[in-house]
Amino acid sequence: METTTDVIVVGGGPAGISAAITIARAGLKVILIERGRFSGAKNVFGGAIYTKPTKEIFPDFETSAPLERKNIMHKYAILGEEDSTVVSYNNKNAEASSYTVIRAKFDRWMADEAKKAGVIIVEETVVKELIVEEGFVVGVKTELEDIGAKLVILADGVNSLLARQIGLRDDIETKDVALSVKEVIKLDKEKINDRFNLEDGEGCVYQLFGGSMLGKLGLGFLYTNENSVSIGLGITLNELTENKITPYELLEGIKKHPTIAPLIKGGELLEYSAHLIPEGGYKKIPQLCANGVMIAGDAAMLVDNLHWEGTNLAMISGKLAAETAIEAIEKNDFSEECLSAYSEKLENSFILKDLKAYRFLMEAAHDRRESFFGYYFKKINEFFESFTSVDSIPKREKYWNFLKNFVIGRNILEIFKDIWGVLKILWGIIVP
Ligand SMILES: Cc1cc2nc3c(=O)[nH]c(=O)nc-3n(C[C@H](O)[C@H](O)[C@H](O)COP(=O)(O)OP(=O)(O)OC[C@H]3O[C@@H](n4cnc5c(N)ncnc54)[C@H](O)[C@@H]3O)c2cc1C
C-alpha cells in the first residue's frame, strides 16, 4: 500500500469527525474518508444537536458554528383525528440544552474544524471494503487506491456495509430500523416567531404522537430553524410493509392536522429527504471492535430513540473510539483484546448506561404498539374533550362514564398485558 497512516476513519458524520479530530489533536496522523461531496451533503436528521456533548468536542461551537435556533420550548402533542392534547415545557432563561442546525452546514463546519486540527479529509470517495490480513484490519480499499493504517474506525452510518463485511454486524431486521421522511418548509423568521411564540434566535421542538400514525410504532417531529421549519416522522419498516402504507402518506396526514397545519401554512417546500434510523436499542448493539477496527455512532446502533438522541451518542462514541485508538498506538497493540477498552469506556459512559436502562423499551413498544401508540392516546384526548366541555352533565357522571368506557373498550387481559409491558420498562430503568 502506497499510502499509510495511523488511523483511517470511514464516514464524515458526527461520529467520524469527532473520532478524527480527537486523534489529530493527540498529534497522530489520521485520514477521514467521506463518500459525500462534503460532510453533511447527504446527511438527514430532525434536528437538534445537544450542547454539552457537542462542547466536549468543540468547546467554542456556540460562538463559531452555524446554528439555527436555541431550543427553549419543548412540546409533546398527542394528535387525535381533529383534536390534540399538547404538553409544553418552556425555559427562556436556561442554558441552551440543544440547538437546531442544518446538517449540510453544521457537518461541513465540523469537518473544517477537523481539517484545521490536522485531519486529512478525502471527500467524494467511497470505501469499498476493508483490507484484512492475518485476521487484522489493516486498511481500506477505495475506488482509487488502497490505504493502510494501524487502525480503522468505522463511522459509516446506519447501513454500515463495512461492519457487515467483516462480520461485526448482521443485516438489520425491519423492526429494528425506522424509515424517516422529512420536509424543510421555508417560512419568514417573523412568522415563525409569531406562530410559535418565540423571540429571535429562540426555537421550539415538537414531538408528535398519533394522528395519521395512531396505533403504529411511529413518531413525528417539528423543529424551527431560523427561516424554515423541519417537519417529519419516523416509522419502523415492518409497520410500513405490514400496513402497506408509505411514510409520505403519513406525513401528509400530519401536515394536514388542524393543530399542525396553521403552523406551516403558506410555507414553501425547500427540501424533501429520507433516511434510516437504527431503532434496535441495547439488545441489538453489535460487536464493537475486532482486531484493528472499532465501530461508532449509528453504525454501532447507538441511538436513544426515546429521547431522540443520536448525534450526541455518535460524537461521544467517536471520541471514545479515538481515545482507545491513541492508547492502542502507544502500546503498539491493535488486538481485539486491547481495543475492548472501547467497549468498557462505552459501558462506563451515559451511552450504554442509557441504552441499557431502556433495554426492554423497544420490545414492549413493538408488542403493545396498538395500545401504547393508539388506544391510550385516544383516551387522553377523549378525557380532555370531556373535561373541557360544559354540557350540564354532572361531573361525577362524566368521570364514571369515562372510566366505564375505558375498561369496556379494552379487554381486561390486554390491560394486564399493557401493565406488564410498562412494568418491564420500569424494571429495566430501575435495575442496572
Ligand atoms: C429524520 C432523522 C431525525 C433525527 N433527528 C435527530 C435529532 O434531532 N437529534 C439527534 O441527536 N439525532 C437525530 N437523528 C439521529 C442522528 O442523525 C444520527 O444518530 C447521527 O447522524 C449519527 O451520526 P454518524 O456519524 O454515526 O452517522 P451519519 O451521520 O449517518 O454519518 C455517516 C457518514 O458516513 C458516510 N459513509 C457511509 N458509508 C461510507 C463509505 N463506504 N465510504 C465513505 N463514507 C461513507 C456517509 O456519507 C455519512 O456522511 C435523526 C436521524 C434521522 C434520520
Image (spheres, rainbow, N blue to C red):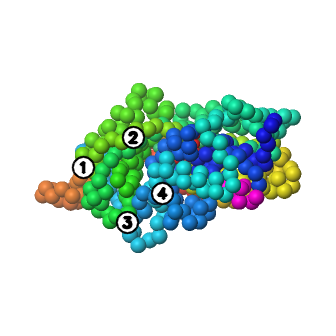
> Crowding near pointer 1: few (<14 within 10 Å), some, many (20+)?
few
Indicate which disc, 3 or 4, sits on the residue closer to the N terminus.
4
Q: Quadrant of ligand 1?
A: top right
Residue farthest to the bottom, as pictured: 93
Q: Secondary structure at mark 2?
A: strand
How far apart marks 4 and 1 lie (CA) works out to 28 Å
Is residue 22 a member of the stretch shown in magenta?
Answer: yes
Against 97, residue 257 (above or below) is above
Given this view, does label 4 or label 1 mark the residue nearer the observer?
4
Q: Secondary structure at mark 3?
A: strand
Pointer 4 residue Cβ closer than 8 Å to ligand 1: no
Indicate which disc, 1 or 3, sits on the residue closer to the N terminus.
3
Q: What residue would you read off at disc 3?
A: 90
Where residue 262 is drawn, which disc sits there?
Answer: 1
Residue range in magenta is 21-27
How far apart marks 4 and 2 lie (CA) works out to 19 Å
Where residue 271 is drawn, which disc sits there?
Answer: 2
Indicate which disc, 4 or 2, sits on the residue closer to the N terminus.
4
